[in-house]
Amino acid sequence: MIEQQKMEIFISKLLEWNRTHNLTGAKNEKDIIKNIEDSLAPLEMNLIATDFKKAADVGTGGGFPGLILAMAMPECSWTLIEPRVKRAAFLHYIKSLLNLSNVTVERKRAETITEKFDLITSRAVTKSSQLVKICKNMIKKDTVLLLYKGESLPDELKGLESFEAQIHERGKRRYLILKSKESDAA
């Protein structure tokens, strides 16, 4: 799915940067690999299509899940949205180092993005209904949202009645897939 060499470089550089910049809670190779596997799980479980043209990841941080999905889906144009300077700098660095021509890094808050996307992903940013509000300018009628959530997910479905919701579980992880029922769901 992803070139082994690119994955090894990513892991090495994330460990290196993490020592000084605290980009992610994954502090060793084993934890980074778990995060990579978690990022790729929706593709391996066939929860979403891989033929999206334009995707965005909100709050990419150290690269999970957006950068990993961008490497796994090279035909899709990915916008990684990360407002924090050090994290955005790392994403720019990795994009250049790995020559990821399908990746754009936006050091902005998601609320300021007005471009529309086919797929929007996010992990551990905020509650699902709040994230939908934050992303409202990026959502069009057929946008799919893939949210990486924890065990408290059922409590987060309130306020999302204008979406079809699917929940898939793997261990303690809940993958929430939202599809708009209306043209102006957000």
Image (cartoon, rainbow, N blue to C red):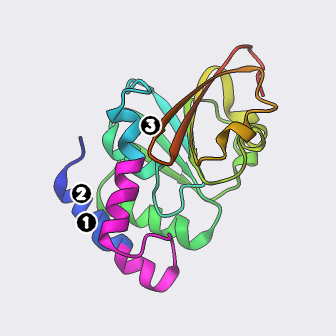
In the foreground, 40 or 185: 40
What's under tag 3, amino acid-wise? Ser
Inter-mark Cα distance, 3 to 1: 21 Å
- The kind of residue tagged 2 is Lys
Give residue 7's quadrant in the image: bottom left
The nearer-to-camera label among 2 and 3 is 2
Q: Amino acid at mark 1?
A: Ile
Q: Reading the chain from its start, which is encountered first: label 3 or label 1? A: 1
Taking the image as shown, residue 48 lies to the left or right of residue 134, namely left
Give the labeled residue for mark 1.
9
Numbered circle sitting on residue 77: 3
Gap in Å between the C-alphas at discs 2 and 3? Answer: 18 Å
Residue 61 sits in quarter: bottom right
Task: Give the image quarter of residue 162.
Answer: top right
- Give the magenta part as a residue range: 15-38
Residue at numbered disc 2: 6
**Dots 2, 1 in contact, CB < 8 A:** yes
Residue toward you, 120 or 96: 120
